[in-house]
């Protein structure tokens, strides 16, 4: 399976051989960036007015932020200098989620906070 395959919208995905040549820190960082970008979209942050964004979906954002928090927590020791900016991005998303919620979660109960601790 060393041939490239196509994703759901025809974009090229890495082949198994390509993935074997990419350092793990880069794979983890790219995964974190994808989760961050998807969460930001689901929070409506890419639009001028997040509250009226057609992409806003706080349930989906919660799942993505929690997955990101788990990935970051589990791999922080391997990320080296990439760890701080990824953690900052995660915390910014957690805060944006709290601000977007009509009924904010209690500290420690927000998305991913069981992995990162409370975010205020």
Image: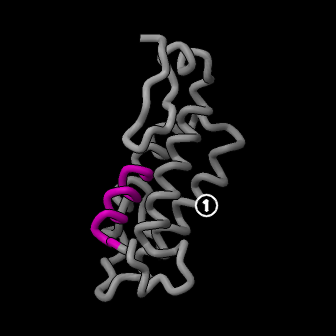
- Taking the spot 62% from the left edge, 37% from the top edge, the residue there is 79
At mark 1, the secondary structure is helix
Residue 2 versus residue 119 in the image, above or below: above
Model colouring = one colour
Residue 2 versus residue 48 in the image, above or below: above
- Taking the spot 39% from the left edge, 72% from the top edge, the residue there is 55
Residue 47 versus residue 17 in the image, above or below: below
Mark count: 1
Tell me: 106 left or right of 93. Answer: left
59 in the magenta segment: yes
Q: Quadrant of residue 71?
A: top left
| Spot occupied by residue 24 in the image (x, y as percentages of width and height) | 57, 26
Q: Main secondary structure of the magenta part?
A: helix
| Spot occupied by residue 104 in the image (x, y as percentages of width and height) | 33, 82
User: Mark 1 packing: few (<14 Cα in 10 Å), some, or many (20+)?
Assistant: few
- Taking the spot 58% from the left edge, 40% from the top edge, the residue there is 29
Instruction: List the single residue furthest toward the right.
Output: 81
- Taking the spot 50% from the left edge, 41% from the top edge, the residue there is 31
| Spot occupied by residue 117 in the image (x, y as percentages of width and height) | 42, 61
Residue 8 versus residue 45 in the image, above or below: above
Tell me: 96 left or right of 58. Answer: right
Magenta range is 57-69
92 in the magenta segment: no
Nearer to us in this view, 101 or 9? 9
Residue identified by numbered label 1:
88
Q: Quadrant of the N terminus?
A: top left
Nearer to us in this view, 65 or 91? 65
Q: Quadrant of residue 51?
A: bottom left
| Spot occupied by residue 112 in the image (x, y as percentages of width and height) | 37, 59
């Amino acid at each position: 399976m060393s041939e490239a395959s196509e994703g759901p919208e025809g974009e090229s995905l890495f082949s198994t051989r390509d993935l074997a040549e990419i350092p793990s820190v880069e794979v983890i960082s790219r995964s974190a960036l994808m989760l961050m970008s998807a969460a930001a979209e689901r929070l409506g942050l890419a639009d001028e007015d997040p509250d009226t964004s057609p992409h806003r979906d706080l349930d989906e954002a919660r799942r993505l932020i929690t997955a990101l928090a788990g990935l970051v927590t589990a791999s922080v020791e391997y990320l080296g200098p990439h760890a701080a900016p990824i953690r900052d991005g995660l915390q910014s998303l957690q805060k944006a989620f709290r601000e977007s919620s009509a009924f904010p979660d209690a500290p420690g109960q927000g998305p991913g906070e069981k992995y990162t601790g409370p975010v205020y």
